[in-house]
């Protein structure tokens, strides 16, 4: 037998990146459900359920591919995660700008979308860091 091909990414990197993406998707889905529950219909910045949950599902699917620790699966999963997390991040920016400021409410209606922007950035960085480890595993 000849030498075996190495994995695309160290299994610990795959596990860490996959877990972070799943945690992000669960937080986004929970925030969407909670915000929809407490925000009256027709209010600016109220999240739509289907597109957000669809992007969360794509993020979880990408995480499953990342955790496969195979050359093709890990790369495909990171691309899917980068796209879905980037889309959710853009959605949070849109929601942040659409939501009206209420100075009498603390922390204010922009708090959740603002935190969503931050969380999206962190999830995006987790995927890019794992992708760089995939490209140069040394």
Image (tube, helix red, strand yellow):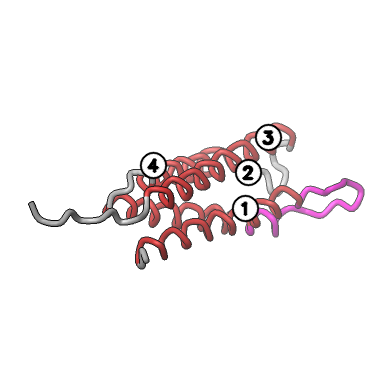
Q: Residue at x 76, y 52 (%)?
A: 110
Mark 2 and mark 3 lie on one chain; the one further toward the N terminus is 3
The single residue placed furthest to the right in the displayed view is 104
Disc 4/disc 2 C-alpha distance (Å): 26 Å
Residue to which mark 1 is pinned: 119
Element on which disc 1 rests: helix
Foreground mark, 1 or 2, reads 1
| Magenta highlight: main SS | loop
Residue to which mark 3 is pinned: 34
Disc 3/disc 1 C-alpha distance (Å): 16 Å
Q: Residue at x 56, y 38 (%)?
A: 26
Q: Is 28 part of what is drawn in magenta?
A: no
Foreground mark, 3 or 1, reads 1
Q: Position of residue 81 (x, y in %)?
A: 44, 52
Element on which disc 2 rests: loop
Residue to which mark 4 is pinned: 64
Mark 4 and mark 2 lie on one chain; the one further toward the N terminus is 2
**Marks 3 and 1: CB-CB under 8 Å?**
no
Write down the region rendered in magenta. 93-110
Q: Is 109 part of what is drawn in magenta?
A: yes
Residue 111 is marked as: none
């Amino acid at each position: 037998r000849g030498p075996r091909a190495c994995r695309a990414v160290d299994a610990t990197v795959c596990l860490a990146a996959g877990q972070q993406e799943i945690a992000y998707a669960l937080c986004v889905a929970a925030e969407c459900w909670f915000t929809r529950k407490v925000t009256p219909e027709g209010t600016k910045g109220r999240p739509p359920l289907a597109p957000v949950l669809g992007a969360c599902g794509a993020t979880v699917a990408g995480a499953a591919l990342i955790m496969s620790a195979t050359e093709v699966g890990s790369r495909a999963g990171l691309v899917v995660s980068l796209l879905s997390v980037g889309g959710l991040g853009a959605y949070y920016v849109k929601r942040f700008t659409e939501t009206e400021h209420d100075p009498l409410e603390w922390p204010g209606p922009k708090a959740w979308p603002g935190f969503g922007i931050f969380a999206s950035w962190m999830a995006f960085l987790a995927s890019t860091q794992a992708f760089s480890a995939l490209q140069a595993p040394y």
